[in-house]
């Protein structure tokens, strides 16, 4: 297991990360240079901006204008067009309040562009998959480092800061979302975001984390015990979630759908929770009190990507989804007291391939024996040396 630990720590060195940080804008020599369209006061307050001229070069548009001229230019463009597309989710009053836009919408000339962009984003190109794999690798390494230091930093806020630091040091531009770091009963809150509580000895920590690399997101969750040992009760629930995670990943292939995989996960979890004794009567109804979420979602330029693509659609090679079974037992749940206040989720990124699937987050340990061995055999000094090789 010590060999496993060293291999995991060597997968993405800090030197590789620094190189990755520096290539993104190397070919855009004029990006950030002020132009005649830039107001001098804007530069003082906000720094150098692209301006109209650089925007043409950067985004390869046929024409570019300052926003201040929108009300003069857009009305004529709308009048000359038979159809107008825009993104409803990001629409702003800057143009939707224009009389010509409202008139066009009234006669049915305006359509939502999202249905087309979501179709384009659903199946990833080889270049997109390269970025998604790199983003997943960064998240895995960042979460691993955070897990290994979780006994040293027994506070949700510290672990949240640690994982963001590790992501950024490996080349991520930003986090894909605010990390979920729930210790003890806070892990039973699905989108817990306070991250401000001390983690008690023996508590489980649930961490849901993702980073963004050049526009592409990762999304990964692990649950572990910072003390290096799962209790028998924690292990019982964890094993159920782990087996559900594995079984659902086996279903990930062309032709399957997220809906089918979700329904299968509900069957597995209901059966397991009844055997454990958490669910007794009305299992399916009570199950949704313990897990109201889907088994997963599409992933790409957004964390919950391609929201206009149905979960009933058969998956294709090049689609990336998450598989994230979980159980969230609130302290108030009417069930065995020993399980109350427990939250466990295991989330992986899965790429659909021609022959099945590839787990993009497979390098991040999720077996109890691997997690316990890593935590109990890890040396802080050696770990830091390995990370900087």
Image (tube, grey):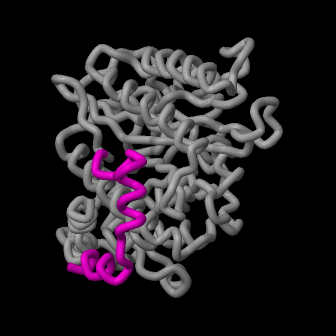
**Residue drawn at (53%, 63%), measured in percent from left and top?**
226
**Location of residue 291 (image quadrant):** top right
User: Is residue 227 visible from the viewing direction of this image?
Assistant: yes
Residue lying furthest bottom: 44
Query: In the image shown, does 12 or 330 lie closer to the viewer?
Result: 330
**Residue drawn at (65%, 38%), measured in percent from left and top?**
328
- Residue 67 x/y as whole percent: 52, 59
Query: In the image shown, does 287 or 262 lie closer to the viewer?
Result: 287
Picture layout, residue 215 above or below residue 356: below
Q: Is residue 52 left or right of residue 161?
A: left
**Residue drawn at (47%, 50%), measured in percent from left and top?**
222
- Residue 340 x/y as whole percent: 74, 41
Q: Quadrant of the N terminus?
A: bottom left
Q: Is residue 225 left or right of residue 245?
A: right
Query: In the image shown, does 374 or 304 lie closer to the viewer?
Result: 374
**Location of residue 135 (image quadrant):** bottom left
Is residue 111 on the magenta stretch?
Answer: no
- Residue 324 x/y as whole percent: 48, 36
Is residue 364 on the magenta stretch?
Answer: yes
Picture layout, residue 135 above or below residue 379: above
Picture layout, residue 112 above or below residue 127: above
**Residue drawn at (27%, 72%), measured in percent from left and top?**
21
Q: Main secondary structure of the magenta part?
A: helix
**Location of residue 81 (image quadrant):** top left
Q: Which residues are magenta?
A: 362-389
Q: Is residue 189 left or right of residue 53?
A: right
């Amino acid at each position: 297991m010590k060999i496993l630990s060293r291999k995991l720590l060597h997968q993405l060195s800090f030197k590789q990360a620094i190189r990755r940080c520096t290539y993104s804008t190397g070919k855009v020599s004029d990006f950030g240079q002020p132009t005649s369209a830039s107001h001098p006061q804007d530069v003082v307050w906000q720094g150098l901006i692209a301006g109209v001229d650089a925007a043409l070069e950067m985004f390869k548009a046929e024409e570019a204008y300052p926003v201040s001229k929108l009300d003069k230019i857009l009305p004529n463009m709308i009048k000359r067009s038979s159809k107008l597309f825009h993104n409803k989710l990001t629409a702003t009053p800057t143009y939707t309040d224009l009389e010509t836009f409202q008139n066009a919408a009234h006669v049915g000339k305006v359509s939502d562009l999202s249905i087309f962009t979501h179709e384009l984003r659903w199946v990833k190109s080889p270049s997109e998959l390269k970025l998604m794999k790199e983003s997943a690798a960064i998240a895995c390494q960042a979460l691993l480092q955070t897990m290994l230091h979780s006994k040293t930093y027994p506070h949700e806020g510290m672990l949240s800061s640690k994982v963001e630091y590790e992501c950024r040091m490996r080349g991520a531009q930003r986090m894909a979302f605010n990390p979920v770091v729930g210790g003890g009963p806070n892990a039973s809150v699905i989108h817990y975001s306070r991250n401000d509580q001390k983690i008690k000895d023996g508590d489980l920590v649930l961490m849901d984390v993702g980073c963004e690399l050049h526009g592409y997101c990762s999304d990964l969750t692990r649950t572990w015990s910072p003390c290096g040992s799962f209790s028998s009760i924690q292990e019982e629930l964890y094993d159920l979630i782990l087996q559900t995670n594995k079984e659902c990943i086996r279903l990930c292939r062309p032709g399957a759908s997220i809906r089918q995989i979700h329904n299968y996960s509900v069957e597995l979890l209901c059966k397991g929770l009844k055997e454990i004794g958490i669910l007794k009567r009305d299992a399916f109804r009570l199950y949704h009190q313990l897990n109201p979420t889907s088994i997963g979602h599409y992933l790409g330029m957004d964390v919950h990507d391609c929201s206009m693509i149905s979960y009933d659609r058969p998956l294709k090679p090049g689609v990336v989804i998450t598989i994230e079974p979980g159980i969230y037992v609130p302290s108030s749940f009417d069930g065995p007291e020993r399980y109350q206040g427990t939250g466990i989720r295991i989330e992986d990124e899965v790429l659909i391939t021609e022959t099945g699937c590839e787990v993009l987050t497979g390098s991040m340990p999720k077996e109890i024996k691997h997690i316990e061995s890593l935590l109990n055999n890890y040396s802080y000094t050696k770990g830091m040396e390995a990370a900087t090789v």
